[in-house]
Amino acid sequence: MVVVRTLRSLAEARFRNISVEDLSSLESTITGDLLPNLNPRARRLLNLASLALNLASTPTMLKPFSMLSVEGRRRWLERVNVESTIYNLISLLDVVVLATHMANPRVSSRIGYRREEAMSRVRVEPLPTLSRSGKPRGVYDVIVVGSGAGGSVVAWELTRRGFRVALFEVGPEPSRVDLVKLHPSFRALKYYWDSGLTFTWGNPIIHIPFGRVLGGTVTVNSGTMFRVPGRALNLWYKATGVNVDSGTLEEAYKVVEGVLGVKQVPEYLLGGNAMAMRRGAEALGLKLHGPVRRPLGSCLGLGECAFACPSDGKIDMRLSFLRDAVSRGLEVYTNAHVRRVLLGDGRVLGVEVELGGVSVRVESRAVVVSAGALNTPRLLLASGVRNRNLGAHLHIHPALGVTAIMNYKVNGWVGTMQSYYVADLLEDLGVLLLATLPPPGIGYSAGSIPFEEIHEYPYLASIGVQVSDENTGAVPRRAVLGVADYNLSSEDLEKIREGVKLATEILLAAGARKVYLPLKTTQGGHNVEDARRVLDRAKPGLFKLSAYHPMSTARMAGDPSAGVVDGDGRVFNYDNLYVADASIIPSTTIVNPQLTINALSLMVAWRIAKEL
Ligand SMILES: Cc1cc2nc3c(=O)[nH]c(=O)nc-3n(C[C@H](O)[C@H](O)[C@H](O)COP(=O)(O)OP(=O)(O)OC[C@H]3O[C@@H](n4cnc5c(N)ncnc54)[C@H](O)[C@@H]3O)c2cc1C
Ligand code: SF4
């Protein structure tokens, strides 16, 4: 099979001394764990990337990549232009090779990461099942589409108030066995949209993963909770003329924080990566830093939050709002793809949903679309809603990771995955720094150091830099090349540079031996001046970017010329059609958005309860 052959030959080229035993483990993990968990679209992309790599080497080397000698492959890889499409496709294959190689317990135990030992502390009791089998019956008061940060809260509040509610979620419900047994690399393939291989299209191409699972992206997020800074409400008013009442928002924040159990991460869970960030911030005399707040459950510091927590350590939508709502009568249907909202004359009648391969028409008195900022506009457009703001104004908060090899052991995979922040650049530049270190081989830190240096993993520290973007992109009606069109503006690039410089300074002040900048051309560096020089010269296409916060694609506004929904989430020109998710945020939240999506969605539910 071309994928297996190509990944194996790439692994041989990347890891200088990989043993025959490790190579055959890699092959069996690809066929046994990777391919079976891949979504069909992602599988096609991997096939395409593998074919492209083999074709690309042929004109100059006269042989497909996997037929070259190991040295030949290395020489050819060194010559690939970092701004070419083939470079991006090779990077994708690199990510897969690294994640699969590091998922091998024999390999990861060499660097001291022993997942099995950590998992033995997790109580493997079955989770109560929230979704039901069978078909929806009769006419519902409310249908909610999507079970993420927005949909779960609306479904909870309306069920609690006695309405008959059905919630349709296209993703699966995770079982405890999968959460404990499956390595996070393979959970990502199951619980992310298109197995996590989703990108924006533009300059540069940006990796933008999001959830396709019960509980939405919250099930696979990092769990960091911020309320928006006060100035966000003015910004929103300026953007769309919508007046979000600060008192009502405060009230909604209090309710959702209470249900989620939001608390500051305690010292014993901060972990080595956060400690390194704190040490650096203190050495530089920074003013605004500390442990983040999060929905804290029985966290064991396993560091796998972004791949669905195996231990109920992160209280997500399933463990809070959905569990309570189901106990009060909410009907949850998973693997249920809503294809269309059924529109009548200025009213919705219900939805058409694909359940178990069969298309079913389900009626309701109101519909709330909570499919997330990248899917809600597409669903509404496919249903016939017309508004030129639908899909436009997309903010994503571009992000990148700065990684360092410290002169002491960090063992950054121990502790809460994202647990410490620095906000000194937030007020002026909208830049937030977060200490984030997922398990070896995946996430920000993965691929940032050369393959030959993975034995240095215990010494790795990593800081995520995220930017509140001024520029916006758009969600196309059909996703052909990317899930969104987005170009980085020079102003936002400037802010990214400043954030990366500060992260570099923090890591050096904390005792870094070498800092790796998030650039495709990076060599490890030792001082701030060199880093500044390299960063100032780097073009947008050289930055290794990702984004986790799509928002504003069906934004709230004072009138339909500026947005898609009114200040209470009702779609303009439709009496009983609402949106409650990241799409309604009028402009950037500046900080991480989950808590604000939860709160705004609760406010939408309050309005629906009044009107039904
Ligand atoms: C790796 C990662 C880390 C993050 N970390 C943080 C963090 O630390 N703090 C923070 O505040 N935010 C974080 N976020 C962002 C946050 O999780 C999202 O902003 C939030 O979950 C968005 O909520 P939503 O309701 O808009 O959409 P989602 O939570 O994405 O929910 C939408 C749901 O709708 C479903 N759906 C879509 N289309 C259909 C359809 N047609 N029919 C049925 N169902 C459908 C999807 O499968 C999905 O489950 C992170 C995101 C990622 C990817
Ligand atoms: S660190 Fe994250 S994944 Fe690990 S137990 Fe805590 S919440 Fe769960």
Image (cartoon, grey):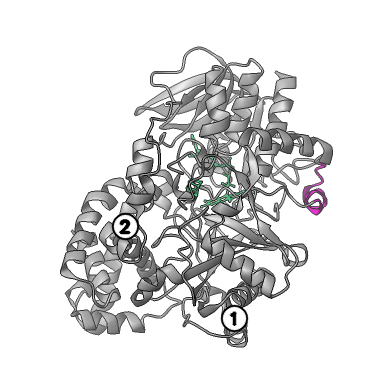
The magenta stretch spans which residues?
230-243
Q: Nearer the viewer, residue 441 or 607?
A: 441
Does the segment drawn in magenta span residue 501? no
435 up-or-down from 254: above or below: below
The residue beneath circle 1 is 535
**C-alpha gap between disc 1 and disc 2:** 33 Å
Q: Residues within 10 Å of mark 1 (few under 14, many from 20)?
A: many
Q: Residues within 10 Å of mark 2 (few under 14, many from 20)?
A: many
In the image, residue 60 lies at what x, y percent? 26, 84
Q: Which mark is residue 308?
A: none
In the image, residue 224 lies at what x, y percent? 61, 50
Q: Amino acid at mark 2?
A: Ala
In the image, residue 109 lies at what x, y percent? 31, 61
Q: Which mark is residue 103?
A: 2
Q: Magenta stretch: dominant SS?
A: helix
Q: Residue at x 26, y 50 (%)?
A: 33
Q: Which image quadrant is residue 367 in? A: top right
In the image, residue 583 lies at what x, y percent? 63, 44
Q: Is residue 491 left or right of residue 484?
A: right
* Mark 1: secondary structure: helix
Q: Nearer the viewer, mark 1 or mark 2?
A: 2
Q: Residue at x 57, y 62 (%)?
A: 274
Answer with the quadrant where ligand 1 appears in the image: top right
Q: Amino acid at mark 1?
A: Leu
